[in-house]
Amino acid sequence: MHLPISPPWSPARAAGHGHASEAVRLLATLAFGRLDPPRAEIRCDTGNAHSRPVAERCGFELEGALRRDPLGVDRAPRDTAVYARLAWDSESKSGMTALALCAGFPLTL
C-alpha cells in the first residue's frame, strides 16, 4: 500500500507556528499505527519553501525529484520533490503513543 500524506494548506498568518508539522506528524503516526503501510510519501513542488521543511522536520527523507511532473491542480508540468518515511524507520514507530494521546486519539500498537 502506498500512502500519500499531504501537508495541510494554511494561510500565511499561520506559518511558522508548527501547525502543519503537527498535522503531518499526527497523520503519519495514525497511518503507521493503524494502517501499517510499508511507506508514506509527501510530494510537493521543488520550489515549495514551506512544505519541504515540514516533510524534513517530520522525519521524511528526500528520495529524489520527478522532473516535469503534473503535480499541481492546473496539471501544468513542474518538478516534484518526493519525500518518504518507511515503516521500519525508527521515527515511524517511536513516540506514537504519546503523540496520539496528546492529540486526543486512542491508538493501539
Image: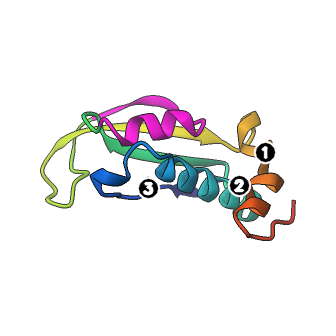
Cα–Cα span, label 3 and label 2: 15 Å
The image quadrant of residue 10 is bottom left
Cα–Cα span, label 1 and label 2: 7 Å
Q: Residue at x 18, y 41 (%)?
A: 78
Whichever of labels 1 and 3 marks the residue nearer the N terminus, that label is: 3
Give the extent of the magenta segment: 49-66
Give left or right: position of 55 versus 72. Answer: right
Whichever of labels 3 and 2 marks the residue nearer the N terminus, that label is: 3
The residue singled out by tag 2 in the image is 32
- Residue 50 among magenta residues: yes
Give left or right: position of 34 versus 1. Answer: right
Give left or right: position of 34 versus 64. Answer: right
The residue singled out by tag 3 in the image is 6
Q: Secondary structure at mark 3?
A: loop
Q: Residue at x 71, y 43 (%)?
A: 92
The residue singled out by tag 1 in the image is 93
- Residue 107 among magenta residues: no
